[in-house]
Image: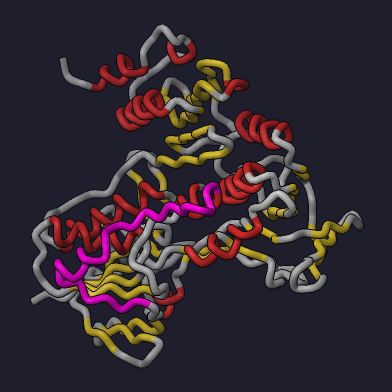
């Protein structure tokens, strides 16, 4: 009987085993995870977990009883140290070996570390695990000074949470605008002003030389000679794919484990899913690696279905979101700084959409407190419907009606 081993007990790993059982796979399944926790979703770590320290919200993929009821063998708190494709075995840190017939790599990413002297100061906290959020939560207080290094989604969500508790917040970003990898300048500048209006000391184009100071009072030294004293430092400077196991086993990697549209690696018996993969997107016509809730879930489901004997192609328009100061931002497609921009609504009030077009095609949309319209924008991108700037800007023209053009009469 086919034995499926899943390495990585995050959202992708959890959804993969859920989908295996949900699609009729009855063989043995083993889940290996470096954390001691059952699979959970990570977005709340920088949002709800920090906003309400008294009642942290954890989104478990499945309750504990489900794994026993579905005959899942759990190997939690264990790191896979070697993948031998010849013998089809996995070696764990305790030297135990596990044989597999099919393997799913859902190893995710690891936070980038600060490559400066003092970057390992005990008050430097990356937000990746439950323990990270739990370590940061006590510092979300009025008498704290939180210094955030990196003005990406994670850093700004942490900054917003800290300000909601009355903490002083300084955000240091080496780029000229926040969220530069994820949103165009129009949105980045809007959020820069939002954070400053909320009392955040946002410093762009800023370099850090080193960190020192006692364990309870880190000192951040900037390249311009300024020194900041912090209660805690949130480090949010990006992540790296956890691909070492795959690389050492000879699988194809390229800033991620390379897979095809069936989530299959260069070894036909090994699949990969989630943040760790570089995969082709036939809808966008490019290869990409995505760090998103949607990709972690749906690519894992596609991998599971293919193993279960249900041929499935993974091809979706990317979708992301961020919550800051009660404002919900959702992004679909791949925003750029070169596309034509069209606005619907008043973005300055954080109620509306920014569309990006290339020719007559919608390529990306960013919705501020507009989740329903964003969903229709995603459908328009996926269906490759021709649109005009005038109809996108006109609130009297329903996006739902534009999306209906893709349907046969």
Q: Work out whether residue 181 or residue 136 is closer to the camera in this orientation and state it.
A: 136
Residue 294 locus on image (x, y percent): 36, 47
State the image quarter where residue 348 is shown: top right
Left or right side of 273 for 157: right
Total of numbered circles in the picture? 0
Left or right side of 21 for 354: right
- Which residue does the image show at 28% across and 70% down from the upper left? 6
- Which residue does the image show at 11% across and 64% down from the upper left? 25
> Going by the picture, which residue comes out furthest to the bottom?
95
What colour-coding does the image apply?
secondary structure
Q: Taking 386 as reference, is 195 above or below it?
A: below
Q: Work out whether residue 148 or residue 204 is closer to the camera in this orientation and state it.
A: 148
The answer to whether residue 275 is seen in the rendering is yes
Q: Quadrant of the N terminus?
A: bottom left
Q: Taking 1 as reference, is 221 above or below it?
A: above
The answer to whether residue 246 is seen in the rendering is no
Q: Work out whether residue 68 or residue 221 is closer to the camera in this orientation and state it.
A: 68
Q: Which residues are magenta?
A: 51-76
- Which residue does the image show at 39% across and 74% down from the upper left? 36
Left or right side of 299 for 344: right
Q: Is residue 56 magenta?
A: yes
Residue 409 locus on image (x, y percent): 16, 14
Left or right side of 111 for 206: right
Q: Is residue 55 magenta?
A: yes
- Which residue does the image show at 39% across and 59% down from the upper left? 277
Q: Taking 395 as reference, is 144 above or below it?
A: below
Residue 242 locus on image (x, y percent): 46, 68
Residue 88 locus on image (x, y percent): 24, 83
> Going by the picture, which residue comes out furthest to the top?
396
> Going by the picture, which residue comes out furthest to the front?
54
Q: Work out whether residue 131 or residue 93 is closer to the camera in this orientation and state it.
A: 131
């Amino acid at each position: 009987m086919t034995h499926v081993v899943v390495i990585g007990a995050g959202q992708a790993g959890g959804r993969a085993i859920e989908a295996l059982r949900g699609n009729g796979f009855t063989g043995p399944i083993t889940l290996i995870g470096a954390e001691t926790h059952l699979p959970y979703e990570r977005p709340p770590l920088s949002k709800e977990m920090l906003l309400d320290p008294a009642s942290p919200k954890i989104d478990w993929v499945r309750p504990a009883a489900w794994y026993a009821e579905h005959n899942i063998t759990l190997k939690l708190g264990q790191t896979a140290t070697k993948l031998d494709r010849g013998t089809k075995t996995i070696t764990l840190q305790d030297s135990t070996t596990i044989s597999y017939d099919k393997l799913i790599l859902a190893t995710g990413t690891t936070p980038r570390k600060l490559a400066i002297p003092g970057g390992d100061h005990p008050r430097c906290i990356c937000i990746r695990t439950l323990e990270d959020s739990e370590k940061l939560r006590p510092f979300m207080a009025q008498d704290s000074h939180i210094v955030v290094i990196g003005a990406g989604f994670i850093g700004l969500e942490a900054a917003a949470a800290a300000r909601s508790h009355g903490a002083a917040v300084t955000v240091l970003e080496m780029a000229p605008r926040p969220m530069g990898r994820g949103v165009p300048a129009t949105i980045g500048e809007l959020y820069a002003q939002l954070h400053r209006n909320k009392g955040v000391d946002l410093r762009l184009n800023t370099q850090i030389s080193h960190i020192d100071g006692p364990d309870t009072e880190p000192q951040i030294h900037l390249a311009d000679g300024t020194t900041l004293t912090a209660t805690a430092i949130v480090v949010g400077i990006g992540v790296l794919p956890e691909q070492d196991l795959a690389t050492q086993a000879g699988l194809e990697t390229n800033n991620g484990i390379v897979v095809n549209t069936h989530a299959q690696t260069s070894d036909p018996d090994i699949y990969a899913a989630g943040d760790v993969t570089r995969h082709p997107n036939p809808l966008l016509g490019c290869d990409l690696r995505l760090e998103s809730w949607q990709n972690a879930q749906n690519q894992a489901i596609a991998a599971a279905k293919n193993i279960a004997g249900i041929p499935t192609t993974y091809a979706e328009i990317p979708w992301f979101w961020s919550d800051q100061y009660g404002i919900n931002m959702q992004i679909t497609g791949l925003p750029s700084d070169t596309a034509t921009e069209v606005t619907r609504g008043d973005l300055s009030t954080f109620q509306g959409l920014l569309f990006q077009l290339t020719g007559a095609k919608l390529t990306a949309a960013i919705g501020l407190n507009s989740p329903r319209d964003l969903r229709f924008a995603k459908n328009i991108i996926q269906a490759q419907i021709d649109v005009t700037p005038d109809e996108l800007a006109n609130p009297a023209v329903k996006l739902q009606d534009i999306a209906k053009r893709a349907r046969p009469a």
